[in-house]
Amino acid sequence: MRQPEFPWKVGSWRDELAGALTSPDQLLDAVGLTRESVGLGAGKPDETHGFDLRVPRAWLKRIVPGDPDDPLLLQVLPRPEEGRPVGGYSKDPLGEQNQNPCILRKYSGRALLLTTSTCPIHCRYCFRRHFPYVGSATLDQIRLLAGEDDLREVIFSGGDPLMLSDEALDRLFLAAEELPGLRRLRIHSRMPVVIPRRIDAAFLRMLGRRRLPLVLVLQINHPQEINEDLRIACRGLSSFGVSLLNQSVLLRGINDSLEIQVALAEKIFEIGVLPYYLHLLDRVQGASHFEVPETEARKLYGEMAARLPGYLLPRLVREEAGADSKTLIFPL
Ligand SMILES: *Cc1c(COP(=O)(O)O)cnc(C)c1O
Ligand code: SF4
């Protein structure tokens, strides 16, 4: 197979990570906005509400300067509303915190591994924003899964598994590939979207050593997140036979319109990615201002179904604590 050419150097993603912005003032400065223009006021000591700001410059580049309603800015800028307690919103909406925190075995045939607690970006709506990580899945824990003979797929999640080095990922994949009966490997990662340079020649060489088919589920919420670097990264991944899917979260004021959803589906297709899930927001404390009510979501979904071919229509789902799969939601 011909090796894809990347216009970036192996490992340059680490500089992107290290150079990420970490304070609201830095971010506002970089996009030419003031605290007043985004309704932030003077600022308080706990203005990030226990979940630090983190925005790499590769993401910053896609924010339109001077627009307080920019859909990429809204995903990462802490809001005063995050500190307001709202009924029905909790720190652990999915009831995951009492389980073995490193390997979640909720769904038939699949084991979900928490491989790291860190992410390249901090999304304000994230349901794991209060997750008390006590470590990450170890090689021994993966090997123990050999006793479970219905296991078909291991899902590498986090945090963001692509925060790990290629060597660490290689070791995890190798351990999983030794499990008898396993058919597929899956990665859930926002990294290729946030820092497309994470996908470099060394990473693809590591993928090239895989014995099992690999599925990579990205998270793109808005068409404006798609740029030339992401296109190049996806082309590299596709050329190595990786199946690319997208999940997004339905977010108030960001992607809760028919036009945006249709444009998103069409644009991800252009970079070789198919839609997978459109999630209703998990009710995590601090994220209530992003919620789109279910009746509104169903109506929007009906309109999407009328406009898009079936293969470009994501499944609208909600996660319910204790359910044995994501719960499908149907159009109104
Ligand atoms: C979402 C999820 C999965 C994967 O579910 P799919 O419907 O196969 O994408 C597996 N395990 C857990 C615990 C999950 O939350
Ligand atoms: S990258 Fe994923 S896990 Fe990390 S903060 Fe964003 S939504 Fe949460």
Image: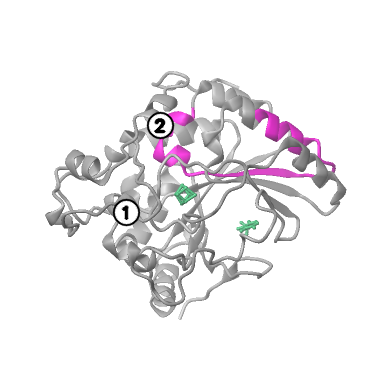
The crowd level at tag 1 (other Cα within 10 Å; few <14, some 14-19, many 20+) is few
Nearer to us in this view, 109 or 135: 135
- What quarter of the picture does the N terminus occupy? top right
Nearer to us in this view, 49 or 140: 49
Q: Residue furthest top?
A: 9
The picture places residue 175, in percent across and down from the top left corner, at 75, 34
The picture places residue 89, in percent across and down from the top left corner, at 45, 71
Q: Which residues are magenta?
A: 170-199
Nearer to us in this view, 290 or 21: 21
Judge left or right: residue 231 versus residue 156.
Answer: left
Q: Quick one: SS at disc 1? A: loop
Residue at image position (69%, 34%) is 172
**Residue 299, placed above or below residue 108:** below
Residue at image position (46%, 39%) is 191
Specify the amino acid type for callout 2. Answer: Leu
> In this figure, which residue is indicated by the disc labeled 2?
17
- What quarter of the picture does the C terminus occupy? bottom left
Q: Earlier in the sequence, mark 2 or mark 1?
A: 2
Image mark for residue 46 = 1
The picture places residue 189, in percent across and down from the top left corner, at 52, 44
**Residue 113, placed above or below residue 195:** below
Does the magenta-highlighted stretch encompass residue 22? no
User: Of tags 2 and 1, which is closer to the observer?
Assistant: 1
Residue at image position (58%, 48%) is 133
State how far apart marks 2 and 1 are (Cα). Answer: 24 Å
Q: Quick one: SS at disc 2? A: helix
The picture places residue 321, in percent across and down from the top left corner, at 61, 69
Residue at image position (63%, 42%) is 136
**Residue 72, placed above or below residue 57:** below
Does the magenta-highlighted stretch encompass residue 181? yes
Q: Are marks 2 and 1 in contact (CB under 8 Å)?
A: no
